[in-house]
Image: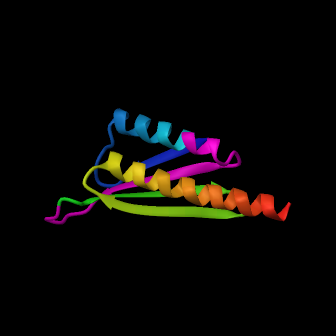
């Protein structure tokens, strides 16, 4: 699966990009028709500790799935997003097999 990582107003380091790639590759175990994933990393200018925003857009046949999380660290956000996407993909796969 092709993963596009875009970091807004900062440069994401190689470790973070590799971490995101590994996590998103695991989603193919749950749904094998994923076309690509767009990942947007942003840092909010707030005084709070939870200022890291991660948005993941998964492109799959029949529509896209979008997840957005705000956390203290990007790794934490990516974990939350991936688990949420995982649940949605399992639901989608169950719906498809119910109709077949």
Q: Give the total number of marks visible in the rendering.
A: 0
Q: Quadrant of residue 40?
A: bottom left
Residue 14 in percent (x, y) is at 36, 33
Q: Is residue 27 magenta?
A: yes
Question: Where are the magenta residues, as a range?
Answer: 26-48
* Quadrant that contains the C terminus: bottom right
Q: Residue at x 58, y 45 (%)?
A: 27
Image-based side of 46 in relation to 96, left or right: left
Residue 35 in percent (x, y) is at 66, 49
Q: Would residue 61 be seen by someone viewing this image from the given angle? A: no
Q: Residue at x 48, y 62 (%)?
A: 67
Q: Give the colour scheme shown.
A: rainbow
Q: Is residue 17 magenta?
A: no
Relative vertical location of residue 45 with respect to residue 19 in this rendering, above or below:
below
* Quadrant that contains the N terminus: top right
Q: Would residue 22 be seen by someone viewing this image from the given angle? A: yes
């Amino acid at each position: 699966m092709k993963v596009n990582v875009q970091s807004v107003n900062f440069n994401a380091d190689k470790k973070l990009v590799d971490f995101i790639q590994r996590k998103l590759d695991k989603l193919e175990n749950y749904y094998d028709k994923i076309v690509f994933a767009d990942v947007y990393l942003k840092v909010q200018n707030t005084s709070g500790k939870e200022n890291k925003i991660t948005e993941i857009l998964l492109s799959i046949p029949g529509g896209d799935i979008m997840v957005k999380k705000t956390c203290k660290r990007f790794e934490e956000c990516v974990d939350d997003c991936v688990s949420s996407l995982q649940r949605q993909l399992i639901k989608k796969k169950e719906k498809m097999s119910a109709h077949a």
